Image (spheres, helix red, strand yellow):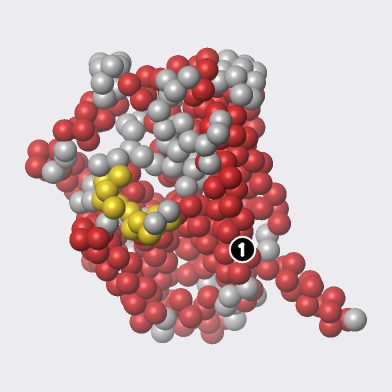
Amino acid sequence: MIQTRIGENRISSNIDWLLILFMLPVLGAGLVTMKSFTGETSFFSHQLMWIGISFLFLFSFSFIDFRFLKRTDVLVTIFLIFSGLLLMLFFFGHTAKGAQSWFSFGGFSFQPSDMMKLVVILMLAKYFSRRHIEIGNLKHIIISGIYAFIPFLLVFLQPDFGSAIIIFFIWFGMTLVSGISKKHLLVVVGIMIVAFGLLWGFVFEPYQKARVINFVQPLSNIRGSGYNVYQSTIAVGSGQILGKGVGFGTQSRLNFLPEFETDFIFAAFSEEWGFVGVLILFILLGLIVWRILHISLLGTTNFEILFGVGLAIYFMTHFIINIGMNIGVMPVTGITLPFMSYGGSHLLTEFIGIGILMGMGRYRRVAHRDDMHNEFLGI
């Protein structure tokens, strides 16, 4: 009897139920909004299925001891596997919305760039956890940048600018957290400006340039490249204080708002729930990020801490960019809103990331001084 209770306590201690409690209303908001405007389509039922599968992955990963991920050979192997998958997309990938980003298997599609974001977080957490004392050395910033640049380039060439920019911000955010000097920060910003100029002149497709121009002048071409943002801002503004009510969002129901189940689900939600609903949503999203950071700070070593911080950066970047493009203050980049947008690949990635974070808590303890000493020495 005592052993059974101990086992139950261990199982319960693996799961951060408070984080799941914050996630559930956001998942529900996405489902309710999707149900209200999809009519006879299968978006709602498919999304419900993917949520169930994602929870199975979360709970399964929360019982794994992830200390094996601290091994360089393991992480490099995982990195090479997903880099290989990104390369294979150029030969066997399915093209959708102008990007060759998907593997299609009948009715099932998989986007490897989503999982690659988690791999980049793990690689950078491993690298910075052993070299955080020497982060002032520009060499480590360059080497870590190479780890991020390889998937960034492979994703960008699909072309999937949205996922590429998420990978960049993961690297940039984790570099900042690791203690980059102000001098090197200026160097990085300078490189970013030069790189953007080169991309604009030689790489960006016309539609990508149009999105950036719409960011500066959102109403310059509302019948063409600026149509999506224009309709999205109308939907958000028309919600006013209390919203039009579930099922009464005219922009989405009358098909004025494009991609209302994926990229612009926030606009559809805002139209139906208004300012009050959006405020509650913002609070929940903030609590999710806070809880992830709280869990990460309890990590045994810097590897676990940095992984949790990287995961928080991943979610914050998705939140900010998606909502920003919905309200017309950021260019449209095809970034999903975590837990709300339709799709299985991004849901699995989000839940697996949280499952890994919870799994790292299985061996949480007060780190022994020798362990910390070894980590500082890079042993």
- Quarter where residue 201 is shown: top left
Residue 216: image location, x then y, percent: 27, 23
Which quadrant is home to the N terminus? bottom right
Residue 171: image location, x then y, percent: 34, 56
For the point 41% across and 33% down, the residue is 259
- Quarter where residue 361 is shown: bottom right
For the point 42% across and 20% down, the residue is 256
Q: From where the camera sits, is residue 48 visible?
A: yes
Name the residue nearer the viewer: 173 or 63: 63
Above or below: residue 309 compared with residue 96? below
Above or below: residue 89 compared with residue 62? above
Which element is circle 1 on?
A: helix
318 left or right of 25?
A: left
Q: From where the camera sits, is residue 337 visible?
A: no
Name the residue nearer the viewer: 375 or 116: 116
Amino acid found under the numbered disc labelled 1: Leu
Which quadrant is home to the C terminus? bottom left
Residue 12: image location, x then y, percent: 74, 67
For the point 27% across and 68% down, the residue is 84
- Characterize the local packing of mark 1: few (<14), some (14-19) or many (20 or more) Cα atoms within 10 angstroms: some
Above or below: residue 374 compared with residue 8? below
Total numbered labels: 1
In the picture of the structure, the residue carrying the numbered disc 1 is: 56
Above or below: residue 65 compared with residue 217? below
Check the image and name the residue furthest to the left: 202
For the point 50% across and 57% down, the residue is 348
